[in-house]
Image: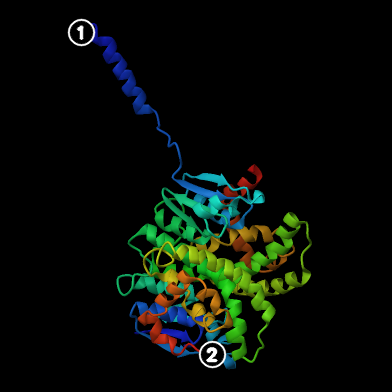
């Protein structure tokens, strides 16, 4: 039975999981969730994710939520096939992947997501862009990207000279960020830009990027 | 033969002594760099103690900005944050990457902090992410307003921020209450990193008005009483009074 992924093809967290499923060559069915009618905030969806958010993965009798827990599960279950995303046979490399996965989760995401929310997601729901929020985030994101620039001048990808889950987790927010007026923050940093061009040209990403638009 | 006797006697004494002395390591392979006041450092220390690992704790003078200086940035963590971790020549940062590494690398030592069974581990991963994405961000804001701001900056809390985040935390804790009514610990029957990761901010919030949000939810309250009584956690906390 194929895995079921409840979510939407333009959602940042859903596409984070989809990128992983594609890298691993896993068959799955994308089951749309109607956010407009609040489907995600009611039963039966709440019994799948009590926090009322997409995505949710169903694999047989296992139901998982939180995109980064789902990708970790898929990578572990399919560790012998597809792209080696977690470097599980090399403990030192595996540890570095986990470090940069946490950087994405704890440092990069809080700095970039408000900008994407204000410029892309909010307007798609009829909200006006709050420039003050954007301005407040740009300083912090600039500092983060400076560290990334330095890091990526020493190795090709974040965890080392190999593509990993650490890079993959950045795909959705980076994609939307590059459509905003703040994209110059990446373009002005040559190593970050080269890294972005590399990871966004991967077939697994190209398979889903066409649907990644908020209209 | 008579001349040989003292030599043989000396050799036998030497062998006896060598057989009975313990050669102590000059330096621990595992080092934790940080401050016992830092929630992120405490998260790693609790893990090291749960695993009963020999280690060295290297105090970072945060008030002097040691973690923002060039040496720390280039050697340990380019983001200038504690904790940093060493295991031999492996250098790591980000507390949850460190705890994860320790739990996997030293799976056979001390407390089991992750499941080997893939389904059980998948559920545990979910609740580790819940801590990271749903709980911590709110808890850290409250800890900042109610604990760190008054303590470090002598400023009073922003009541609007506190009220908003108490409201958000209450909703999250309702979900925890439901979960812990079905499961002794967040990941399942056993204490794991999913529970441990909550300890540091829980500790700080318990000393504030936010405590009532935990006390009013019986399963959450029982879970907190259980995990905060763990000897490894108490050992980590004890470092606060030693520094």
Report which residue position mark 1 lands on. Answer: B1
Across and down, in percent, residue B71 comes to: 54, 50
Report which residue position mark 2 lands on. Answer: A214
Q: How many marks?
A: 2
Q: Residue furthest top?
A: B2
Quadrant of image for the C terminus of chain B: top right
Q: Is residue B152 left or right of residue B100?
A: right
Question: Alpha-carbon neighbours of circle 1 within 10 Å: few (<14), some, or many (≥20)?
Answer: few
Report the chain holding disc 1: B
Above-or-below relation of B8 to A135: above
Residue drawn where x is 32% and y is 62% of the image? A89
Task: Say what secondary structure mark 1 lies in.
Answer: loop
Q: Quadrant of residue A51?
A: bottom right
Above-or-below relation of B144 to B134: above
Across and down, in percent, residue A37 comes to: 58, 93
Above-or-below relation of B41 to A165: above
Look at discs 1 and 2 and give the one toward the viewer. 2
Q: Residue furthest left?
A: B1
Report the chain holding disc 2: A
Whether residue B145 is visible here, answered yes or no, is yes
């Amino acid at each position: 039975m194929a895995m079921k992924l409840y979510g939407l093809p333009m959602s940042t967290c859903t596409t984070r999981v989809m990128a992983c499923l594609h890298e691993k060559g896993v068959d799955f069915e994308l089951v749309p969730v109607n956010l407009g009618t609040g489907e995600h905030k009611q039963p039966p969806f709440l019994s799948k994710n009590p926090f009322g958010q997409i995505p949710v993965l169903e694999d047989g009798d296992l139901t998982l939520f939180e995109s980064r827990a789902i990708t970790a599960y898929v990578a572990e279950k399919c560790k012998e096939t597809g792209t080696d995303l977690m470097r599980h046979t090399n403990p030192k490399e595996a540890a570095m992947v986990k470090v940069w996965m946490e950087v994405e989760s704890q440092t990069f995401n809080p700095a970039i997501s408000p900008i994407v929310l204000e410029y892309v997601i909010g307007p798609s729901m009829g909200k006006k862009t709050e420039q003050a929020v954007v301005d407040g985030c740009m300083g912090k994101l600039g500092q983060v990207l400076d560290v990334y620039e330095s890091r990526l001048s020493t190795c090709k990808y974040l965890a080392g000279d190999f593509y990993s889950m650490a890079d993959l987790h950045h795909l959705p927010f980076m994609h939307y960020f590059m459509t905003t007026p703040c994209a110059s923050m990446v373009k002005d940093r040559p190593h970050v830009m080269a890294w972005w061009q590399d990871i966004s040209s991967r077939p697994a990403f190209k398979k889903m990027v066409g649907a990644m638009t908020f209209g | 033969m008579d001349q040989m006797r003292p030599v043989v006697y000396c050799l036998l004494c030497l062998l006896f002594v060598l057989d009975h002395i313990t050669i102590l390591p000059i330096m621990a392979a595992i080092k934790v760099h940080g401050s016992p006041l830092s929630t992120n450092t405490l998260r790693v220390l609790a893990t090291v103690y749960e695993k009963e690992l020999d280690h060295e704790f290297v105090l970072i003078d945060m008030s002097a900005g040691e973690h923002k200086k060039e040496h720390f940035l280039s050697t340990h963590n380019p983001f200038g944050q504690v904790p940093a971790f060493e295991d031999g020549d492996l250098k790591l940062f980000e507390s949850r990457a460190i705890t994860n590494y320790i739990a996997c690398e030293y799976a056979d030592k001390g407390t089991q902090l992750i499941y080997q069974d893939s389904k059980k581990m998948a559920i545990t991963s979910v609740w580790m992410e819940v801590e990271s994405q749903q709980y911590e961000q709110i808890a850290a804001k409250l800890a900042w307003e109610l604990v760190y701001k008054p303590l470090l900056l002598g400023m009073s809390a922003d009541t609007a921020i506190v009220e908003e985040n108490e409201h958000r935390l209450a909703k999250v804790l309702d979900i925890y209450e439901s979960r812990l009514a079905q499961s002794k610990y967040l990941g399942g029957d056993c204490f794991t990193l999913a529970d441990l990761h909550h300890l540091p901010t829980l500790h700080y919030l318990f000393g504030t008005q936010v405590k009532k949000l935990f006390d009013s939810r019986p399963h959450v309250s029982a879970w907190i009483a259980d995990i905060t009584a763990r000897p490894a956690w108490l050992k980590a906390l004890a470092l606060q009074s030693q520094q």
